[in-house]
Image (cartoon, rainbow, N blue to C red):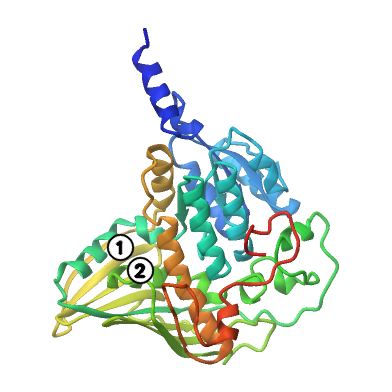
Amino acid sequence: MMNRRSFFQTAAAAAGLPPAARSAANRVNIAIVGLRGRGKALAGSFATVPGVGIEYFVDVDQNVLAGVLAGFEKKTGQRPKLAGDLRRVLDDKSIDAVVVATPDHWHAPAAILACAAGKDVYVEKPCAHNAREARAMVAAARRHNRIVQHGTQARSRPATQRAIEVARSGKIGKVLMAKAWNVQMRKNIGFKPDAPVPAGVDYDTWIGPAPAMPFSENRFHYTWHWNWNYGTGDMGNDGAHQLDQARWALGVGHPLEVSGAAGKLYFDDDQQTPDTMTITFRYPGKMLLFEMRIWNPYAMGGIENGVAVYGSEGMLEIGKSGRVNGYRVYDRAGKLVHQEEDDAADTHAHNFIECVRSRKPPNAEIEVGRLSALHCHLGNIVARTGRGLKYDPATESIPGDAEADRLLGREYRAHWSTPQGLA
């Protein structure tokens, strides 16, 4: 006779759940790939989720791995195994999920490979280096029945969720426009020549499927953000968060037209990506404006990176000041009528693990992430070509502009991580 525990384990297996969802302890074993800024922070976040075992730290820089491991073990008591090659994790049947916190050019390749290996995925924003990779990620998630969470943490933040409810409720009237801004201080990175690869760095794997370039400190740790070969500029770096919230508040999907201006107005250095942008997205009956300046500290309404949602009867502001997240509601006369705040705790990791266990869609499911990342990619295409574009959602293309349409994808070099069907 089958007992109750055996019944539920058999039912879970029949439903195609991963090993973690079938285990008596409901443990989820994860690997974190990329261990510097976001990866290190995410390791701390996932360590606070009950029933999560961080089994691997994966990074191509052995110097980073050693440094992060010592502090993590002291703080949490966990000692993950160290690996320099993602394939070691993909081959390990005990791993249920992979957290991808690599440079942008590795987001899609790592996520697609993880889905194919039967792993669920948490992937940092923007979910891909370009629009066609993002579409391939959605296809991989559907094909392999995987849970994929996009790293736009505000989707799991209670204050932001309540702000979106206000925007959708009619309390500020008919919502027709939103503005997202990224106004903060970045630094001049100067000019640095090509140099030998540092000891302990597997640079060939770091490049992955991207076209090869010689090593340079200004195209490596963090500064890769400002090189088109590997990054998506600050629009994809921090702007991805605010664009996601603005799109969420407006209730819009694909933009039909994108226009604006962008350039390097302040920095004289190796950065290729703009330091200043004003990009407008048009939808049927609605608009979204993105404004970026990364060379001054002048917050707007006390918010460095935020969103304003404009309704016919009032306005809503969403953003973070220091360690506090929140929103403010103003009436038609500009009077503050309501505000709420909560701390900046990362509940997004908890949501992902809950969904790994339940198989319910996460708060920032990969199709949500793809649509928001698409805004970053289209804005960057306007910046790179110097002209506006029309976007066709039916074909996911930019008709009538071959140069702009090519920038929806990229060229790849032959590498074991190159996404199939895109090379």
Residue occupying image coordinates x 30% and y 62% = 160
Q: Nearer the viewer, mark 1 or mark 2?
A: 2
Residue 287 makes an appearance in the image:
yes
**Label 2: how many residues lie within 10 Å, few (<14), some (14-19) or many (20+)?**
many
Residue 68 at x, y percent in the picture: 64, 49
Asked whether 68 or 150 is in front, the reply is 150
Q: Secondary structure at mark 2?
A: helix
Residue receiving disc 2? 245
**Mark nearer the N terminus (1 vs 2):** 1
Residue that numbered label 1 is attached to: 160
Would residue 295 appear left or right of 90 to someone viewing this image?
left
Circles 1 and 2, Cβ within 8 Å, touching? The answer is yes
Q: Amino acid at mark 1?
A: Thr
Q: How would you rate the neighbour count of disc 1 (Cα within 10 Å): few for under 14, some for 14-19, many for 20 or more?
A: many
Residue 279: x, y in percent? Answer: 44, 85
Depth check: give the residue in front, 130 or 342.
130
Q: Type of residue at label 2?
A: Gln
Q: Residue 190, relative to residue 328: is it above or below? A: below
Residue that sits furthest to the right in the current view: 196
Q: Which mark is residue 338?
A: none
